[in-house]
Amino acid sequence: MIKVYGVHGSPFVRKVFVALDYKGIPYDIVRQMPFSGDSEYLKINPLGKVPTLVDGDLTLGDSKVICRYLENAYPEPALYPTGLADRAMADWYEDLGGGYLSELGAGIFFQRFMRPFAFKQEPDEELVARITDKKLPPMLDYLESQVPADGFIFGDFTLADLCLVSPFINAGYAGYDVDSSRWPGMASLIARVKEQAQVKAVLDKEAKALGLG
Ligand SMILES: N[C@@H](CCC(=O)N[C@@H](CS)C(=O)NCC(=O)O)C(=O)O
């Protein structure tokens, strides 16, 4: 049985859970906290980050690498679009969502969720305001120009949809909602992705794990 090391709440672990569920692949979750410095875990993932996937003799870190492996090993149902240009765009969206956007979402999540609830510290609201008022608006303007008014980016649901939306799911846990009067396309894509069957199922488990459900 495939094993996934990680915890609910991480956008990268979420991606792998959704990919496995979407493809109907059974797996066990091995609870592994990020930033733990756990020496046993560092033996299988020297970066200490989550997720890590173990499939028999194969041990892989990094959600992007893991999801490409899953797509190649279990092609149906597909989680990436076919066609050179669409596939390249999906990779770009995955990179953007898992890179810069994820840092912004994590910044809000860390300040407004982790600091008060896990560390009993005040959030740095100046830092949050810099993200919400300065850094996110130009990104949201760009995303608004990319996303469809209905359905998903490439027609069927793909990981690109989840990757662009995931940072906003984490920011949402910390009370930040995308302004639907300013970015209606992005706000509605976020709502549709959260309702997608496998995403919804993972988010329900996440809410319980984070004490929100
Ligand atoms: N590029 C990695 C990023 C994974 C990542 O940053 N995970 C976070 C949790 S959301 C983590 O483990 N952070 C701990 C650390 O940076 O030491 C992926 O896609 O899997």
Image: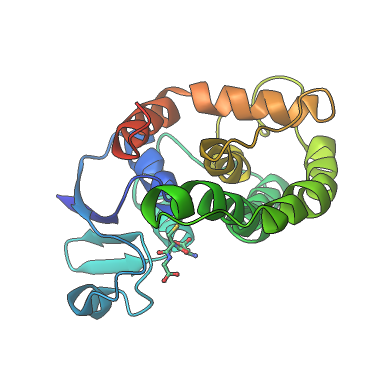
Which of the 4 image quarters holds residue 142?
top right
Q: Position of residue 100 (x, y in %)?
A: 67, 60
Residue at point 69%, 51% (across, down) = 84
Q: Position of residue 133 (x, y in %)?
A: 81, 47
User: Front-most of 22 and 137?
Assistant: 137
Q: Is residue 207 left or right of residue 58?
A: right
Q: Position of residue 137 (x, y in %)?
A: 82, 45
Count of number-bearing discs? 0
Which of the 4 image quarters holds residue 199?
top left
Relative to residue 95, is residue 197 depicted above or below?
above
Q: Is residue 148 visible?
A: no
Q: Is residue 179 visible?
A: yes
Relative to residue 179, is residue 115 depicted above or below?
below
Ligand 1's image quarter is bottom left
Q: Is residue 33 left or right of residue 120?
A: left
User: Front-most of 75 and 22?
Assistant: 22
Relative to residue 62, is residue 181 depicted above or below?
above
Residue at point 70%, 50% (across, down) = 89
User: Front-most of 125 and 198?
Assistant: 125
Residue at point 73%, 31% (across, down) = 186
The C terminus lies in quadrant: top left
Q: How is the image coloured?
A: rainbow
Residue at point 44%, 46% (across, down) = 15
Q: Position of residue 110 (x, y in %)?
A: 52, 54
